[in-house]
Image (tube, rainbow, N blue to C red):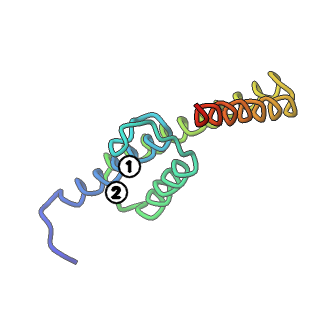
């Protein structure tokens, strides 16, 4: 193993945890993606990153400082709570959609909107 400055491993570990936390928060739609400058919500990616942090917790058990353990557990707990909140929002939105319109009516409305759009595009090309 390469000899490192005292405390460097701790700093690297904390940096990794914070980096994964930021990645998960972006995937949860809680932070703006710095690459796209938009909210890019992807719950599958968020879940993968949270699971990765859980694996990191398991694999480093007994090999962390107290501060590293507290930070890692706080980050995992916070992310899991935010994930569950987003899943619940999706569930409520689906319930709202189901109560708002019968699925056949909604599909029919989408078909009508697409037909109107196509008709407008056709008229614009003729003009």
Say left or right for 29 vs 33.
right
Residue lying farthest to the left in this orientation = 5
Say left or right for 53 vs 1.
right
The mark tally for this picture is: 2
Give the SS element for disc 1. Answer: helix
Q: Nearer the viewer, residue 47 or 99?
A: 99
Q: Position of residue 5 (x, y in %)?
A: 12, 63
Name the image quarter holding the N terminus.
Answer: bottom left
The residue under label 2 is: 64
Quadrant of residue 111 within the rendered picture: top right
Q: Position of residue 83 (x, y in %)?
A: 56, 39
Sequence order check: which comes first, mark 1 or mark 2? 2
Say left or right for 98 vs 36.
right
* Rendered position, 45 above or below 88: below
Quadrant of residue 4 within the rendered picture: bottom left
Q: Nearer the viewer, residue 61 or 124?
A: 124
* Rendered position, 99 above or below 33: above
Contact, mark 1 vs mark 2 (Cβ under 8 Å) = yes
- Write the residue at 57% across / 45% down: 43
As measured in the structure, the alpha-carbon distance from the residue carrying label 1 to the one carrying label 2 is 6 Å
Name the image quarter holding the C terminus.
Answer: top right
Q: Nearer the viewer, residue 120 or 71?
A: 120
Q: Which label was assigned to residue 114? A: none
Q: Nearer the viewer, residue 21 or 10?
A: 21
Residue lying farthest to the top in this orientation = 100
Q: Position of residue 2 (x, y in %)?
A: 18, 75
Give the SS element for disc 2. Answer: loop
Count residues near mark 1 (Cα–Cα under 10 Å), then give few for <14, some for 14-19, many for 20+.
some
The residue under label 1 is: 69
- Write the residue at 38% across / 49% down: 69
């Amino acid at each position: 193993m390469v000899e490192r400055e005292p405390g460097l491993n701790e700093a690297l570990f904390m940096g990794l945890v914070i980096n994964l936390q930021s990645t998960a928060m972006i995937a949860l739609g809680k932070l703006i993606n710095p690459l796209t400058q938009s909210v890019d919500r992807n719950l599958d990616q968020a879940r993968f990153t949270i699971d990765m942090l859980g694996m990191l917790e398991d694999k480093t058990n007994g090999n962390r400082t107290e501060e590293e353990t507290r930070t890692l557990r706080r980050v995992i707990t916070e992310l899991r709570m935010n994930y569950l909140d987003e899943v619940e929002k999706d569930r409520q939105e689906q319930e709202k959609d189901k109560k708002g319109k019968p699925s056949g009516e909604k599909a029919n409305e989408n078909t009508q909107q697409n037909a109107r759009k196509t008709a407008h595009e056709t008229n614009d090309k003729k003009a």
